[in-house]
Amino acid sequence: MPMGKPGGKQKMDFCSVNRQLRLVAFLSLAVVIAWPAGVVRAGDRGGTLPSFSAVKELVLREFDKFPDHQPADIISRGQVEPVFRQLAGLGWQVADWREILEAVPADGDFLVKQLRTPGGRKFMRGIAKYPDAYDRLDRLGRLPYGKNTIRALIRGPGGYKLIEYMTTASGGRELGRQLSNAPKGKNFNDPTGRIYTAKLLLARLKESYTAASRPRSC
């Protein structure tokens, strides 16, 4: 039986495989070029994200369910946790939801409980317009006798004025610098990094949304 040239079949198979590899590489490149910018690939992160306007609408609608809730009121984890389930139903699994939830005050947090009393609500709505008011109040509560001070501010008719002074006056910042030297008073004038309001929650969600919208690099 006649024999073919040594290595002939191997050469033919190699050429065939080489053509297939070139075809696969070409098709892969075509997919990358054609994929719309900013769209999350299905299978990479669970499909295309909803618009952030839809996310914002859902979040605000969730807080509207709570009686007498106003936009600048303090929020708590019990209110925020269902938001992530709702967002998952909308098509966005928030990757760092645990980290976000951890930054929201717990339902039993001293500040939450105090600001949800009748007097506390009135006090809260008197200070909410001032920048970083919740941060200052939170830090104040961590000082020795700070909780008693907050209770006194809530009971007093002009208690909100101390927070106004701390957040808007140069003397208030100086007071904060002095309180930074007190036990548990370090960085008194700085934001705590906690999420106190729906507005702050939306700002934090926007950061996560931007990261999730970014196409994954190979």
Image: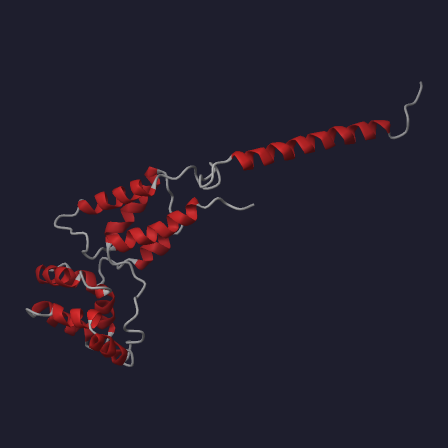
Q: Which residue is at 15% across, 51% downward?
A: 69
Q: For this rendering, which residue is in front, 136 or 34?
A: 34
Q: Which residue is at 22% across, 78% downward?
A: 175
Image position, residue 217 (x, y; %): 53, 46
Q: Which residue is at 59% across, 35% downward?
A: 28
* Residue located farthest toward the left when viewing the structure as drawn: 157
Q: Describe residue 89's horizontal placement relative to residue 21 as left or right.
A: left
Q: Describe residue 183's horizontal placement relative to residue 49 as left or right.
A: left
Tell me the quarter of the picture where residue 14 sits.
top right
* Residue located farthest toward the right when viewing the structure as drawn: 2
Q: Which of the colour schemes (rainbow, by chain, secondary structure, one colour) is used?
A: secondary structure
Q: Is residue 186 above or below residue 41?
A: below
Image position, residue 156 (x, y; %): 7, 70
Image position, residue 62 (x, y; %): 23, 44
What is the total number of numbered labels drawn onto the structure image? 0
Q: Is residue 143 above or below residue 8?
A: below
Image quadrant for the N terminus?
top right
Q: For this rendering, which residue is in front, 63 or 37?
A: 37
Image position, residue 16 (x, y; %): 75, 28
Tell me the quarter of the picture where residue 191 sits.
bottom left
Q: Which residue is at 8% across, 68% downward?
A: 155
